[in-house]
Amino acid sequence: MSYEGPEDEAPQPRSRRALTITFAALVPVVLLGWLAYSALGEEPDRPASAASPSASAAPGGTGSPSPSAGPLAGKVVLVDPGHNTGNFRHTAQISKQVDIGTGKKECDTTGTATNAGYPEARFTLDLAHRLRALLERQGATVRLTHDGDRAWGPCVDERARIGNTAHADAAISLHADGSAEGNRGFHVIMPGVVHAGAADTRPIVAPSRKLGALVAGGYRRTTGEPFSNYLGDGTGMVTRTDLGGLNLSTVPKVFIECGNMRDKSDVALLTSGPWRQKAAQGISEGIVSFLHES
Ligand code: ZN
């Protein structure tokens, strides 16, 4: 809902248009699109490359055809953009209780926002688009749990189910935290052992731990973002058994809390398009390493 489209489809000031025309004479259109969103920091377009020939035509916009080339050909990655910008307007629907194995929990939550009003759900969807483009370039098939194409949700149990049904080789849920000013840094959340009701994480705990360590390493390397100074005892790694999106997963899955949207140091990073590109790069590198080793 909040996806505003790539910068190069938006009205442009005269100087930028003139610059675009100059470049257009010199570089291929695909490269131009890349340069435009890298430089301007807006949400990326799907690359119009041979690696994703009809991705934008996928039903509902959430699925992608399987690319036929690249080192990750045949691998499926589930990318879950946390929350939904429409959740704020659908509090009745998202507060409905769903079964997460260990008990009941809200279908979904609104997520947080910066003090200036940049919502977590918009951050996560932008990051998801960047991550999808990078993984597809490696030949992976990428599924999103939603693509700004629904009014609210999906519920956390459905988010897990989408990755399970896709038989994802790796799954990641993207978030940013809403903690107190001064609390900063990122952390990766991994599933703990849960065996209750519909939840049985026992087969995914070990591979998820490996995935989490690789994602944390890649993210730290490309962004320079420190490990959380308020969770995880300085390791950047946290294990939880209360998240439906992890409890109900049957495929290796982690969450990443990319930073704290209430801390001004982190906000300066989270609201920067070029920085989000680095974040996507780091997460992608972690997932790619995991898929190569698994
Ligand atoms: Zn969140």
Image: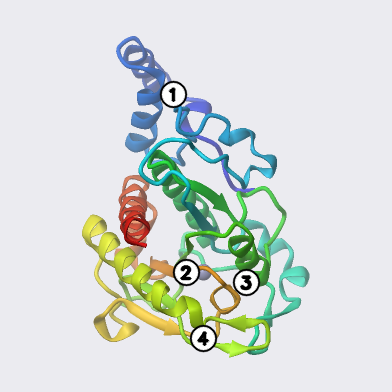
Q: Are marks 3 and 2 in contact (CB under 8 Å)?
A: no
Q: Are marks 4 and 3 in contact (CB under 8 Å)?
A: no
Q: Alpha carbon of mark 1 to alpha carbon of mark 4: how far?
A: 50 Å
Q: Earlier in the sequence, mark 2 or mark 4?
A: 4
Q: Earlier in the sequence, mark 3 or mark 2?
A: 3
For disc 1, the marked residue is 13
Q: Nearer the viewer, mark 3 or mark 1?
A: 3
For disc 4, the marked residue is 241
Q: Nearer the viewer, mark 1 or mark 2?
A: 2
| Label 4 element class | loop
Q: Alpha carbon of mark 3 to alpha carbon of mark 1: how far?
A: 37 Å
Identify the amino acid type marked 4: Thr
Q: Earlier in the sequence, mark 1 or mark 2?
A: 1
**Is 262 positioned to the left or the right of 80 in the image?**
left
Q: Position of residue 17 (x, y in %)?
A: 41, 18
Q: Earlier in the sequence, mark 4 or mark 3?
A: 3
Identify the amino acid type marked 1: Pro
Q: Hey, which quadrant is residue 159 in on the image? A: bottom right
Q: Is residue 179 above or below residue 149?
A: below
Q: Nearer the viewer, mark 1 or mark 4?
A: 4
